[in-house]
């Protein structure tokens, strides 16, 4: 098959495998990756050593895969018809929408492997590697080059029909496939995401300072959350949807995700006190097969303590007092901070007459 026909067939097979979007990018580094080294130099990667230790590979995937010629990029919708974080009850916690259902790594990886097998059956044997947030590939950059979406000012990819609610996976191949064209800008003069971010993680359009991002603070950061950042975390206990919730393109909900991504019991607007009572066994049982397990119990309860402190509700003091006696020092310290935050204001003594 010629490169154009083979690319068309590869994308058709991707849709047959259950993906919602498919496109082709050349293996050469997209222009946007030219900013990656500066992004790291600015300190925006924070403690994410898997980014900084593989900087050369992430600037150009051919450093890791010199045999690569084309990248088949796929997308899978995960939006479900439930409230946005900005609409949920104020007393509830919030888990990012992508983590409500089954772990997307497992769902995407299984389909990518199935896709590779079907493509081999038609094109003959070829070299390939599949990635879903697990390797030295800046997936959004190659997905943007493949036309899956335009870069948004919040650094997510935007699609005119799917918004930004879609997972991305890549099949790096040594096949010669005709590349697709990237999409034009879709943000225009809109700054809704920049204006809405409560921690100032978007210092400029299209630039993310991960160290200030609530997703980083509640998932990637393994130690204490800086006290100066805790108020901005609000009630987010795993990830954050705010910059996507306010995006006008995500208000045009045209597609519903498959049942695998529907919220599991207790993950949509979870009860903070219920989460605070989880022991290790309870945590593992509650989040088995879920992306939330990445935070580990200590990370989740650290976040829950911050959310309880931000609630302003002194009724949470008893559960926070229990967390302040937790075996993990990280949980203890954040619970003590929350208790101080919920401490009743001292009454002012009456002035002497």
Image: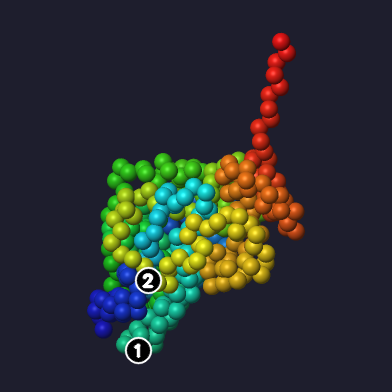
Is 340 placed above or below 23 here? above
In this view of the protein, which residue sits in the foreground, 291 or 4? 291
Which residue is pictured at 38% across the width and 63% down the height?
Answer: 80
Residue 221 at x, y percent in the picture: 60, 55
Q: Quadrant of the C terminus?
A: top right
Residue 276 at x, y percent in the picture: 63, 57
In this view of the protein, which residue sits in the foreground, 12 or 342? 342
Residue 224 at x, y percent in the picture: 66, 50
Which residue is pictured at 37% across the width and 44% down the height?
Answer: 192
Q: Secondary structure at mark 1?
A: helix
Determine if residue 251 is in view. yes
Q: Kindly identify which residue carries mark 1.
A: 121
Q: Quadrant of residue 122?
A: bottom left
Q: Residue furthest top?
A: 353
Residue 258: mark: 2
Q: Secondary structure at mark 2?
A: loop
Instruction: Give neighbour class at mark 1: few <14, some 14-19, many 20+ (Cα, 10 Å).
Output: few
Q: Earlier in the sequence, mark 2 or mark 1?
A: 1
Which residue is pictured at 30% across the width and 42% down the height?
Answer: 189
């Amino acid at each position: 098959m010629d490169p154009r026909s083979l690319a068309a067939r590869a994308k058709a097979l991707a849709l047959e495998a259950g993906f919602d979007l498919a496109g082709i990018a050349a293996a050469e580094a997209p222009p946007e990756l030219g900013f990656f080294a500066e992004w790291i130099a600015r300190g925006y990667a924070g403690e994410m050593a898997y980014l900084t230790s593989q900087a050369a590979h992430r600037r150009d995937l051919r450093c890791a895969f010199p045999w690569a010629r084309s990248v088949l990029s796929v997308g899978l919708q995960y939006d479900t018809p439930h409230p946005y974080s900005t609409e949920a009850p104020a007393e509830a916690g919030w888990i990012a929408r992508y983590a409500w259902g089954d772990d997307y790594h497992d769902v995407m990886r299984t389909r990518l492997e199935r896709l590779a097998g079907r493509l081999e059956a038609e094109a003959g044997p070829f070299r390939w590697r599949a990635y879903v947030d697990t390797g030295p590939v800046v997936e959004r950059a190659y997905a943007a080059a493949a036309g899956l979406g335009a870069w948004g000012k919040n650094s997510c990819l935007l699609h005119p029909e799917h918004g930004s609610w879609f997972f991305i996976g890549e099949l790096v191949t040594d096949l010669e496939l005709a590349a697709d064209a990237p999409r034009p800008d879709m943000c225009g003069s809109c700054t809704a995401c920049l204006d809405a971010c409560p921690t100032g993680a978007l210092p400029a359009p299209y630039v993310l300072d991960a160290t200030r991002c609530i997703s980083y603070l509640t998932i990637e950061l393994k130690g204490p959350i800086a006290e100066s950042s805790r108020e901005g975390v609000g009630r987010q206990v795993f990830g954050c949807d705010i910059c996507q919730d306010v995006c006008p393109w995500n208000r045009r909900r045209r597609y519903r995700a498959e049942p695998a991504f529907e919220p599991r019991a207790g993950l949509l607007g979870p009860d903070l006190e219920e989460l605070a009572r989880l022991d290790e066994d309870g945590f593992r049982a509650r989040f088995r097969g879920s992306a939330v397990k990445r935070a580990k119990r200590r990370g989740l309860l650290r976040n829950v303590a911050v959310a309880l402190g931000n609630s302003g509700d002194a009724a949470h003091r008893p559960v926070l007092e229990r967390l302040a006696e937790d075996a993990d020092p990280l949980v203890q310290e954040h619970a003590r901070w929350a208790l101080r935050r919920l401490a009743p204001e001292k009454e002012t003594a009456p002035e002497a007459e």
